[in-house]
Image (cartoon, grey):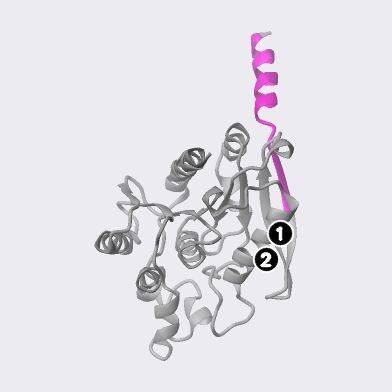
Amino acid sequence: MRLIIFFLFANFLYGANVETISVFSISMNKQIKNLVITPDQYEDISLASVYLLHGAGGSYLDWNTKVQGLEQYCDSLNIIIICPDGGGNSWYFDSPIDSNYRYETYICGELVNFIDNKYLTKKDPKFRAISGLSMGGHGALYLSIKNQNIFGLAGSMSGGLDIRGFSNNWNLSDRLGNIKENPKNWENNTVIKLIDRFKIKDLKLIIDCGKDDFFLEVNNAFHNKLIRKGINHIYKIKEGSHNWIYWRESVFEHLNFFTEKFKNQI
């Protein structure tokens, strides 16, 4: 009897709603799928939102299918989680050479507006966060630094925070052109250079990387540059590599960081 009661109670507590929504991108002239997780009682009050970006070659389904407990977390802490599709290897910027890849415009303009109109969200950037893994870590910092009027909190897990050393990987040259022939495209779209162009004021940052990750060096460089610029942030080097074993734990650290900051704003 106790087991049955506990099972029913758990279902009552964690009744998060998961739905796939299709959003038409005017900038790219196509429908894009996104996963949205809302708590069971979200209709009663406006909530903070967290955008989670997938890595290269991934999809909008990755976070929910590969991480156990995301729905329960969303329901118990009353937040809305949005997982956009990043078009495989878009790197989440507006490609200067391919108009089919305008993912900064899509996420920061079209998708955020759609979510805020369809769901009861708090529209102040202090209650809107973005994070991601690998390509998504780069994307989350890139989008938040350039659009601090939209995102007030951001994180990166194992992020490729300087893409210039990986010009032969992940279709990057298809988005930016050959690095030797188009160096400005690469300089303008690698997140580590944005710190020189954009003043970071109230953006709350959390960044981490596994000590055996091939992106550790660029994460260390990004961290050191933030220190030199006097930009407050949390940075952790943890046990682990570039895989879902690492990200399954790291994502909850980011969500805890965000929700604690959300509470401090109330």
Please, what is the three-letter code of the amino acid marked with disc 1?
A: Phe
Majority secondary structure in the magenta region: helix
* Left/right of residue 109 with respect to residue 176 in the rendered view: right
Quick one: SS at disc 2? Answer: helix
The N terminus - image quarter: top right
Residue 8: x, y in percent?
70, 20
The residue indicated by pointer 1 is 114
* Left/right of residue 3 with respect to residue 162 in the rendered view: right
Q: CA distance from mark 2 to mark 1?
A: 6 Å
* Left/right of residue 60 with respect to residue 221 in the rendered view: right
Q: Which residues are magenta?
A: 2-20
Up the image or down, 206 lies above or below 95; here it is above
Residue 73: x, y in percent?
57, 36
Residue 36 magenta: no
Q: Residue furthest top?
A: 1
Up the image or down, 120 lies above or below 192; here it is above
Quick one: SS at disc 1? Answer: helix
Q: Which mark is residue 110?
A: 2
Residue 15 magenta: yes
Up the image or down, 262 lies above or below 141; here it is above
Residue 248: x, y in percent?
48, 43
